[in-house]
Image: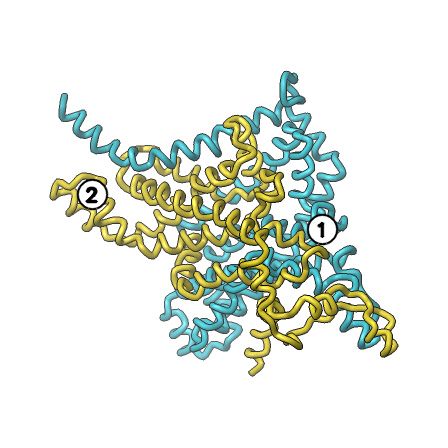
Chain colours: A yellow, B cyan
Amino acid sequence: MLLGLLSVLFLLPLIVTFTNSFMGEIEIALNYSGKLSLFDLAEGISSAFIKLKLIPAEATLKQYKSVLISDPTFLVLLSNSIKLTVPVVIGNIIVSALASYGFILWKFKYKEIIFYIYITIMLMPMQAVLVPNFIAAGKLGIQESYLAIILPGVFSPFGTFLLRQNMKSIPKSYLESAEIDGASHMSVFINIVLPQMKSGIAALAMLTFIEYWNIVEQAIIFIKDYTKEPLSVYLSRIAEGRISIIFAASCVYMAIPLWTLVFGREDLERGIEMSGVK
Amino acid sequence: MSDYFIKLKARSAGLGFLLPSLLGISIFFIWPFASTIKYALYDKPIGGSFAGLNNFVELMGNPAYRLGLKNTLIFMAFSIPLNMALALSSALVLKNSAHRKLFTLIFLVPMVIPSGSTAFFWQKMFAKNGFLNGLLYSIGLSRINWLDSEYAMAVIVIIFAWKNIGYNMILFLSGLASIPKEHYESAHVDGAGRLRVFLHITMPGLAPTFVIIFIMNVINSFKVFKEVYLLTGSHPNESIYLLQHFMNNMFNSLNYPRLGAASILVAAVAGIAAIIFVKMERQV
């Protein structure tokens, strides 16, 4: 019972955003602009506060209609987020899967030192990595394009780290028996290794997706054109301008990662474990 | 002779797989990092003269930098113990619970929801005329300027804890699971009470995991910038002006030497963390 209450409280931001997405424009203005209305004055209320209403007085789908159909702005921004996130997820998985297998296959005295460099880069917070990325983008002439964000993401060492951790659970006998049969490394990779890495790849996909769907620091630095901003940054700027659609916009925006959570909770958990303590 | 080449080919097969990643890392991380170091050691981005550690010294004296650094450290000092304590408690409670899957799901929701989706909610919650103040007002207390005073630090600590408890809890659950059951069983046989079990079996068993989680938290602390930026924009209240706010200003002025110095300092901290991380990984 208590736990139930705590859970509701915990999920309040989600719940409010969801229920309020069905509120009509006028009701939102009444509740959220924090300005005194005639009703307030009539009741002798002299200070206006924002009311956080859970249940709309009048439920309507107008917000969603606005967001998804009548108003193109949101869809453009949504596609910006997609254009940033999807290439990173796909690219990173490919590069990291190949690299993790490479680390197993490569017989080189100093390969652990190289892996250690990977870990070091992986642990760098944005503040340490952003400047080198910025410099590289400048030298490659891509500072204005999404590539400045996508390419470092594709080559992020976290993926390689995670998948190599995942590889540890593949029995060596699998790999060796295929080699003895004379199969080429690439076919061993595709036919034996990849299927074994399914859950690791799923975890990596989820973690990478969540991270880039929510990108902020890089977006501020590299994207100067408002129309090219991803939703992660744009939604916070809405403020007074378009509060009438913000709830629906937020819901659509968060629906996608939530969807993956519903289906991929186990993979996500495993991914988190592998990245830290296993 | 051909034997040697056959062996070389076999050995370099791995290298082939590794090549895209190695190239990418070199181009986007290692090479520009070397450039960053070079910029940090010169006084001007182009055509300057060698400045040694001047930039670093100047940085330390820069009041904006010190403010950003101070606030970042204050944030960590509050946030990390809070997050780890909350996550550990939750993990201990949920460890053997039937509802574990459900609550893990619930706790993961904030992490999965992008910060932008709930930014509006938090803004309206903590605004000067926001919902929370409305509650305070209705019970006769005076309003608090949540987002534009020292209370702002409390706000971001809370929001960040909300976001990260799921992540930390999973790490703790995993660490707890690796403590051999026999230890608990023998303690039970010896009649040890809950607190003793916790102090003498759980905590020592958790030790290397604990350090790893601590490091992950230190590194992840920098991510709070997302919430701060989305809540208060580029120019927040003094008490939540973070390192990244400082660096953003320098990006706009293209002050490479200072940027370089600032980022290298952060990198140095991360480098130390990496050493400890690897050491602890081996012990888990």
Secondary structure of the residue carrying tag 1 is helix
Which residue type carries mark 2?
A: Ser
List the single residue furthest toward the bottom. Answer: A1
Which residue is tagged 2?
Answer: A187
Q: Nearer the viewer, residue B111 or A70?
A: A70
Query: In the rendered view, does A88 fall on the left or right side of B3?
Result: right
The residue closer to the viewer here, B217 or A260, is: A260
Taking depth in this image into account, of A56 and B245 the one nearest to the observer is: A56
Q: Which residue is mark 1?
A: B240
State the image quarter where residue A96 is shown.
Answer: top left
Of residues B214 and A177, the one drawn nearer to the viewer in this rendering: A177
Q: Chain of mark 1?
A: B
Residue B182, horizontal then vertical, whole percent? 36, 70
Residue A112 showing in the rendered view = yes
Q: Which residue is drawn at the image coordinates 48% and 67% (left, top)?
A: B200
Question: Is residue B219 in view?
Answer: no
The quadrant in which residue B83 appears is bottom right
Q: Position of residue B65 (x, y in %)?
A: 71, 39
- Foreground label between 1 and 2: 2
